[in-house]
Image: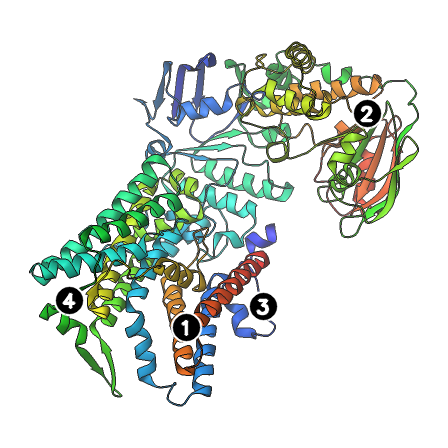
Amino acid sequence: MSNSVMSPPAKPSGSSRGLGQVVSKVPSRFLPVIATFVVFVATFGVGSARYEGFASGQVMANLFIDNAFLIVLAVGMTFVILTGGIDLSVGSVVALSTMIAASALQAGWPAWLVVITVLAAGSGLGLAMGWVIHRFGVQPFIVTLAGMFLARGLCFVISVESVSIKNPTFRDVATGTIELPGGVTITYPVVIALVAVIAAVYVLHLTRFGRTVYAVGGSESSARLMGLATTRVKIGVYVISGFCSSLGGLLFSLYMLSGYSLHAVGMELDAIAAVVVGGSLLSGGVGFVIGSVVGVLVLGTIQTLISFEGTLSSWWTKIVIGALLLAFIALQRIIVRRT
Amino acid sequence: MTEPVVDMRGISVEFPGVKALQEVDFRLFPGEVHALMGENGAGKSTLIKALTGVHPLAAGEVRYAGGSVSFGGPAEAQAAGISTVYQEVNLCSNLTVAENILLGREPRKFGRIDGKTMRARAAEMLARIGLHIDPGSVLESHPIAVQQLVAIARAVAVDARVLVLDEPTSSLDVDEVAELFRIIRVLRDEGVAVLFVTHFLEQVYEISDRITVLRNGRLVGEHATATFSRIDLVSAMLGREMGVLEEIERRTGTPGDPLLVAEGLGRKGSVAPFDLEIRSGEVVGLAGLLGSGRTEVARLLFGADKADSGRVLVDGKPVHLRGPRSAIEVGIAFSSEDRKAEGVVADLSVRDNLILAMQAARGWLRPVPRKLADELVAKYMEMLDIRPANPDAVVGTLSGGNQQKVLLARWLVTEPRLLILDEPTRGIDVGAKAQIQKLVADLAAEGMAVVFISAELEEVVRIADRVVVMRDRQKVAELDGGAVGVDDVMALIAGGGGVEKAVAS
C-alpha cells in the first residue's frame, strides 16, 4: 500500500484496446457518457449515409424541437435517479399539466397565471410524493406509482375530451421560430429546454445541494453521518422532478396545442430509458445530465431514422430502444467490474 | 499534566433492561493516544456513543474543553471538535477525495462551489497527514486502507481536538497499520487527543500512551501503557487470572478412524489438488495467509464450491458433494468466516436461531417439541456461556463473540461429525476466544472431528493435532501439532524465499 499512497493513483486503464489511447486516459466514470455520444454519432452517421438530406442542420434542430419536453423530463428524472430513486409519475404529470393548461386557458385565465399554476401543481405533487417517501420510508417506486395513477385520474376529472388551446400567447410561443445562422430554425421550447439543462448542470455540479444528491446516491448513511442535509435533498429531487414534469407538460401542450388525458402515456419510461442510455446507474450516485440529454437525442435519432425509412412501423423504435437499454446496462456492468 | 480535554465523570447509560455503563470515569488529555480496552460487550462503543451524543446519559456529566456539554448527535459533536472514524469507511465512494473531505463545508464563491479552492484545501489536509494522492481522483479508485485514511483526513479537517478511532485497523494489513500509526503520531504531536479502540494488543503497546480498561460496563482502571504489562492488561480485561489460555493441555487420546478422506480434491483457479485425511476426535488446523487457499479448502470439503478434480470419501465410501445440503446429510458442518452474511439470522432470537437449525436437521415433517427445544437451548447456552443468558434475546443485539457462539451452537445442535470452523475467533474478545478454543478441544475429546482455520498461528498450533499449511493456493505441508512451533509454520508459510511477511500472525 505504501506505493499507492506515495505515488499518484494509477487510473484504471480499461478498454484501451479498440478505442485507443485517448480513452484509456479518461476516468471510467465518463465512459458511459462517451459511449452514449459515440452511439449518437454512429446512428446519426448511419442516417447521413443512407438518406440524402439527413445530415442537415435542420434535422439536428428538429431532434431538439421534437424532443424538447422529453429533455426536460429526463433532466428531472436524472436528479431522482442520481439519489437512487425513481419517478414513475412524470408521464401522467405531463398529461395533467396539458389538461390544466388547456382548460384554464379555455376558462379565460391569463397565460402567465396558467404557467404558474401548472408549475406549482407539478412541484406540489412532487413535494407530496417526496415527503411520503421520506416520512414513511416507502419505496419511491410505489409512491410515484400512486402519484402516476392520481395524476392520470385527475386528468379525467377535468375532462375526458381533448381540449384544444386557442390562447394567442400560447399559439405565438408555439409557432414562433428563432433563426440561427445557416438557415436553421428552432422553437422557443428548445431554448427553454436548454436553459433547464444548463440550470441542472449548474445545480448538480456547483452547488452543495447538487453534490449532496450525488452523495446520497453513493451512500445515504454515509452522507447522513457526514452531516449533510439528506432529508432536504431526498425530498427536493422529487420537487425538481415534479417541476420538470410540469414544465415538460407545458412544452408538450405547446407542441400539441391541446390538453388531453391520454397524452404522454408511458412517457415516464422514455425518460427513464433516456437517463439509463445516457449512462446513469439506477442504483444512484453515477451519471450526468448531459448524458441524459444525449440519451434523448439517441432515442430521437432512431425515431427520425425510422420516419426517413418510411416503410418501417414506428414500433421498431421501441425494439431498438429496448436493445440499446440492454446493451447499456451490460456496458455499465463491464465498466463497474473492471474498476 | 495539563487539563483534560475530555472529562467524563460517573457516566451511566441504560438500555431497556440492561445497564450498559455504570459510573464510568474517563479522561482524555490533549496530545495523547489513549487506548480504550475491554472485551466485547464491555461498553467501549457505548462510552464513545455517550461522548458523541448518540446515547443519552442516565447519570453523570461530560465535560469538554472545560465546560459541561451534552451533544445531540455525532454532527453536533463534530462541529464542536470531536470527530469519529468508524470501522467501516463512512464516505461516498462515488465522489472525489476532495469532496469527501470537505462535503458540507466546501468553499463557495457567489453561492457556487469553488472547485479549485476546494481541491487546494483538500490537498492541504492530505499533506498534513502525509497522504499524497490526487484530491480530484474518485475515492473508489483507492484501496480501502487509503479510504480509511481519507476518512481520518475528513475527521481532522475541522479543527478536531479529539479524534475517536473505533477499531480502524481491523481491515488493514501490516503496512497500512504502520501508515495509520504514522498519521496518528503526527496528529498527537499537534496536540490532538486520540481515543483508540482495537482488539490487537500489539497495536495498543505500539501506539498508546495510556490505557483505560472497561469490563461489564464498569471502569476497571486507567494505566500508563509503559508500566502496565500485557498479562496485567489481559487479566484486567478478563477479570480473572491468566491461565485459561494455557489450560488447554494437549490431549493424549489417540484419534479414531479416518472420517473424511479427500483424494486429489481441487478446483481450478481456487485451490490446487490436495490429499487430506481427517480422523474423528482430531483437530486439524489450516494455516496460511489470507488468500492462501484456507477458506477454499473448507468450502470444497463442505461442497459450497464444486470440486473439478478428485473425490471425497466419508467412512471409506465415496460421496458426491453436490452442495451444502448433501454435506450436512453426511454430518459435515461449516461455520463461515462471515458470520453476519452467512451465519446467524440477526433478527431472530437465540432460541429461534437454534430451533431453525434443529428443525432443518430433523426434517420439516417432524416438529421439535417445545420441551426438547427448551432443554437443548438451555444446554447449549450454558455449554457455550452465551451472554446474556436469555434465550429470547435478539441475536443482532449480542456482541460479536456471543453471536459467534450462537452460530456454533446452531451447528452443534445438528450433531455434526465433522465441524469446519473458518476464523471462529476473529474480531472477538480474548475471553470468548479462550472459551471457543476450549470448546473445540472438548468436542474433539468427545469424538468430533474439527477443521480449525485461523489467521492466528499461535491459536492454530496450540489447539490442532495436525497443522496443514497452505501457500499460494497449494497445500505445502502437514505437520504434527505436538511437535510443531509457530516459527516452523511461519517459515513454511513464508516459503523458500522467506521474503513475504507473515501478515497472518
Which amino acid, mark 4? Ile
Which of the pair B263/B50 is nearer the observer? B263
- Which residue reaches farthest bottom? A52
Which of the pair B78/B18 is nearer the observer? B18
Q: Are marks 3 and 4 on the same chain?
A: yes
**How dense is the environment of label 3, judged by Cα within 10 Å: few (below 14), some, or many (20 and up)?**
some
Indicate which label's residue lies in the foreground, 3 or 1: 1
Q: Which residue is mark 2?
A: B417
Distance from disc 1 to disc 4, alpha carbons, whole Å, reads 27 Å
Question: In this picture, is A279 found above or below B342?
Answer: below
Numbered mark located on residue A314 in the image = 1
Q: Secondary structure at mark 2?
A: loop
Residue at (42%, 79%) from the top-left corner? A305
Q: Secondary structure at mark 4?
A: loop
Which of the pair A314/B171 is nearer the observer? A314
Which of the pair B139/A221 is nearer the observer? A221
Residue at (68%, 27%) from the top-left corner? B425
Q: Are marks 2 and 4 on the same chain?
A: no
Q: Which residue is mark 3?
A: A15
Question: In this picture, is B451 found above or below B115?
Answer: above
Q: Chain of mark 4?
A: A
Q: Position of residue B34 (x, y in %)?
A: 50, 27
Question: In this picture, is A289 found above or below B38?
Answer: below
Q: Position of residue A89 (x, y in %)?
A: 32, 52
Q: Quadrant of the C terminus of chain A?
A: bottom right
Q: Secondary structure at mark 1?
A: loop
Of mark 3 and mark 4, the one earlier in the sequence is 3
Numbered mark located on residue A165 in the image = 4
Q: Are marks 2 and 1 in contact (CB under 8 Å)?
A: no
Which amino acid, mark 3? Ser
Q: Position of residue B97 (x, y in %)?
A: 45, 52
Q: Are marks 2 and 3 on the same chain?
A: no
